[in-house]
Amino acid sequence: MENIIKKVTLNDLHEALGGKMVPFAGYFMPVRYSSDLDEHNTVRESVGVFDVSHMGEFMVKGPNALALIQKVTSNDASKLVVGQAQYSCFPNEKGGIVDDLIVYKMAEEEYMLVVNASNIEKDWNWINQHNVFGAELTNLSDGMSLFAVQGPKATEALQPLTPVDLSAIKFYHFTVGDFAGVQDVIISGTGYTGAGGFEIYVKNEDAQKVWDAIFESGKDLGIKPIGLGARDTLRLEMGYCLYGNDLNDETSPIEAGLGWITKFTKDFINSENLKKQKEEGVSKKLVGFILKEKGIPRAHYPIVNLHGEVIGEVTSGSISPTMGLGIGLGYVQTEYAIPGTGIAITVRNKNLEAVIEKLPLLQKK
């Protein structure tokens, strides 16, 4: 049976706006509207809007909702207050990661999990498989649209649309309120660009109205629609992981530098083994690097030491539009994972000099 590629609610609008639509994570998604460089700079300097309605949303409710979340996620969700969100991951039994996600505490005994589009079915099955607690689970993914309004002018663009004081929403906090004349919109101080801004969750039937209102409100600020191409370079400059590239079923959160979302104050799936990893150390680690020579590092290119011996592999790479240099993420043997270490990336049989840098890479202007 052929895999049917889904369309987001505003697919026709993106086509009309000149979006180049490509299959991504089971959906047709706009990869760019104008150019990746222009769209990247729009988000870094002003404000841009991503339609990321392909993402998945699950509601977990009931007296044992927290018990289930604590069992399947690595972070400590008991620390959340209503109106707060938390980055986390689902560890699997063999040391890898099922997915990374965001946990929202909507109310006492009610949580929303936001998962990656490519993993919606896998994650849904995973959570249900481990729901020995009788928590009430609802998959809202097909009924929700999500717009990431990102950039330093995001607050200015959106504030006229809502009575909610947007400047009061702290990073990784959210509120539910009226937005663009629509009730019960989730307005979240999250995003994957490092440029600031909000993510707006609406029902599909309100998506067009909300999108139009955002663009009308932001038109004097130069607001633009932004595609997946710029989304990738923006997250790379910050050193944010992309599932399927930098994280997968084989990579452990400790190796991936996600020890900060792996809390051993509770029992969760595979916590004993991950705790051992944290205490004893791991043989490879995810690092960020910047090329010192002209070239584009791509996923799966070898990372070598200064003697030309292979010590790892690139998992994500591109040219940073902000810095004009090749940048990337990759796993290397632990002894090379120290910022300042000289390495090389093998690009078309040529070893190009690079250096391991602290994340985010963007600070290195």
Image (tube, rainbow, N blue to C red):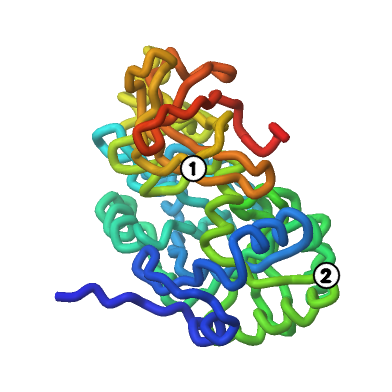
Residue, far left: 1
Residue 82 vs residue 11, the one in the foreground? 11
The part of the image, by quadrant, that contains residue 104 is bottom right
What residue is shown at x 79% (from left), y 71% (from top)? 222
Above or below, 107 against 277 in this view is below
Quadrant location of the C terminus? top right
Q: Which mark is residue 15?
A: none
Give the residue number, with chain letter if any, for mark 2: 221
Quadrant location of the N terminus? bottom left
Give the residue number, with chain letter if any, for mark 1: 296
Q: Is residue 300 left or right of residue 294?
A: left
What residue is shown at x 74% (from left), y 71% (from top)? 223
Q: Does dot 1 land on a helix, a strand or a loop? A: loop
Query: Residue 138: x, y in percent?
Result: 40, 68
Q: Which amino acid does label 1 sit on?
A: Ile
Q: Does dot 2 land on a helix, a strand or a loop? A: helix
Above or below, 199 against 245 in this view is below
Residue 280 vs residue 105, the one in the foreground? 280
Q: In this view, does 72 lie to the left or right of 287?
A: left
What residue is shown at x 72% (from left), y 61% (from top)? 42
Q: How far apart are marks 2 and 1 (CA)?
A: 32 Å
Q: In this view, does 1 lie to the left or right of 43?
A: left
The local crowd at label 1, few if under 14, some if 14 to 19, many if 20 or more residues have their Cα within 10 Å, is some
Query: Residue 134: x, y in percent?
Result: 33, 57
Query: Residue 298: x, y in percent?
Result: 42, 43
Ranked by sequence position, the earlier of labels 2 and 1 is 2
Query: Residue 28: x, y in percent?
Result: 41, 74
The local crowd at label 2, few if under 14, some if 14 to 19, many if 20 or more residues have their Cα within 10 Å, is some
The part of the image, by quadrant, that contains residue 118 is bottom left
Residue 44 vs residue 241, the one in the foreground? 44
Q: What residue type is labelled 2?
A: Leu
